[in-house]
Image (cartoon, rainbow, N blue to C red):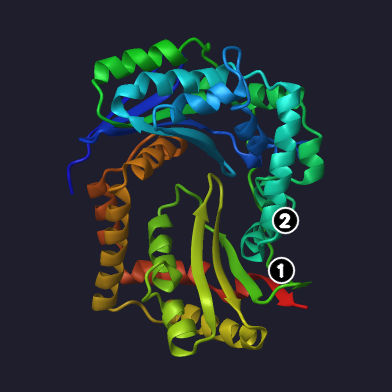
Amino acid sequence: MQEERYERWTLSNGIRCIHRDVNSPVAHLGFFVNMGSRDELPDEHGLAHFVEHTIFKGTKHRKAYHVLSRMEDIGGELNAYTTKEETVVHATFLNQHYGRAAELFSDIIFNSTFPKKELEKEKSVIEDEINSYLDSPSDMIFDEFDELIFDGHPLGRNTLGTPESVHSFNANSVKQFLHRGYRTDQMVISSVGRINLINLKKMLERYFSADIKSVAGHERKSFSGYKPKRIELEKSNYQTHLMMGTEAYRSDHDDRIGLFLLSNLLGGPGMNARLHMTLRERHGYTYNVETNYSSFSDTGLFSIYLGMDERYLNKCIDLTHKELRLLREKGLGTLQLHKAKQQILGQVAIGQENNQSQMLGIGKSILAFDEVRTWKEIADKIEALTSEQLLRIANEILNEKDFSYLIYRKK
């Protein structure tokens, strides 16, 4: 792969910046804040996501239409998303419009006015988004499984909130949330594109340093006390849906990459993943099967999702347990380990070929770890994994006696 060179600096008010120069006419800019749904207070369920929506609804200088048209008018794209631990605004545009994107970001982040009429309209939009999500059991079960695992903790709440909580928000709610968490030491600007570095530094200093230096005004409540549970619910579905999994490693854990490899081997996107081969190809029991490993600043979650006909539920569970036991009891052979590493290396490399994905990835890395690992550093970590290490990880995490289960049975 092409050697990665990143330029890093910090604005006068503490906002961290990272840029990678690429030979492309298209640029990507992202603004990251270390504030997500887990940072909401008990009466703020869904507020982080509500803020993400409403910062586009008018500023001191623009009405909502002009905010939305600013990038669209030059063929660009403007978007945002909220996770449990961060909120991100990002744009894609031609290189010559860097200044337009940076100025717009500054305006919506620091000058949004949250007019009451626009807030009320957006509440209805988000309620419709919630209803759309409730219509999709294969999406809803992931969030309800989070709630099962992180019982009573903010990590267990979905990012959308409820219709009741969303309709309770007002401009004051939003401004209090912003004041508590949108601090300059918790912000990162990430850029991937072709622009003179000196010009980029001057531009970002001009548009983003007006906000005075500030430090985080909140502390995250760490999760502890996980206990396995099993819940079965009747739903008006055609399929039976199953989630199983357990608490896993936090985002800075030394064994995180090893667990990621095992998750990929077991049920990653490859058609040759073990659960795919066993449950779908050999037995024809399921169409949808996947594993996921999500890591957070203080904990993590390993999960397996299956969608199947009701009559195959117990068979799918038994076969999944069999594959888990195999990983715990029998280390990967030399050839198996080599193939698993090559698959991961290929997937990571292909992902980094996408400049937008790279912009989002390096921004999140700076936000969470204050560093970015190069392709070579990542590859070295993967190549260093041993069969013995993976066997130990499998026994620590992939043990069904520690698993929780959430099942949507067909009525």
Vertical placement of residue 106 versus 56, above or below: above
Q: Is residue 95 visible?
A: yes
Vertical placement of residue 406 versus 316, above or below: above
Q: Earlier in the sequence, mark 1 or mark 2?
A: 2
Element marked by disc 2: loop
The residue lying at 31 percent from left, 42 percent from top is: 355
The residue lying at 36 percent from left, 76 percent from top is: 272
Residue farthest front in this picture: 73
Q: Is residue 12 visible?
A: no
The x and y percentages for residue 374 are 27, 43
Would residue 4 be found to the left or right of residue 70 on screen? left
Q: Nearer the viewer, residue 149 or 117?
A: 117
Q: Amino acid at mark 2?
A: Asp
- Label 2: how many Cα within 10 Å (few below 14, some 14–19, many 20+): some
Q: Nearer the viewer, residue 251 or 108?
A: 108
Q: Amino acid at mark 1?
A: Lys
Residue bearing mark 1: 229
Vertical placement of residue 100 versus 84, above or below: above
Residue bearing mark 2: 151
The residue lying at 50 percent from left, 36 percent from top is: 79
The x and y percentages for residue 118 are 71, 27
The x and y percentages for residue 195 are 25, 24
Vertical placement of residue 391 versus 50, above or below: below
How far apart in space, not on screen, are marks 1 and 2 (Cα)?
10 Å
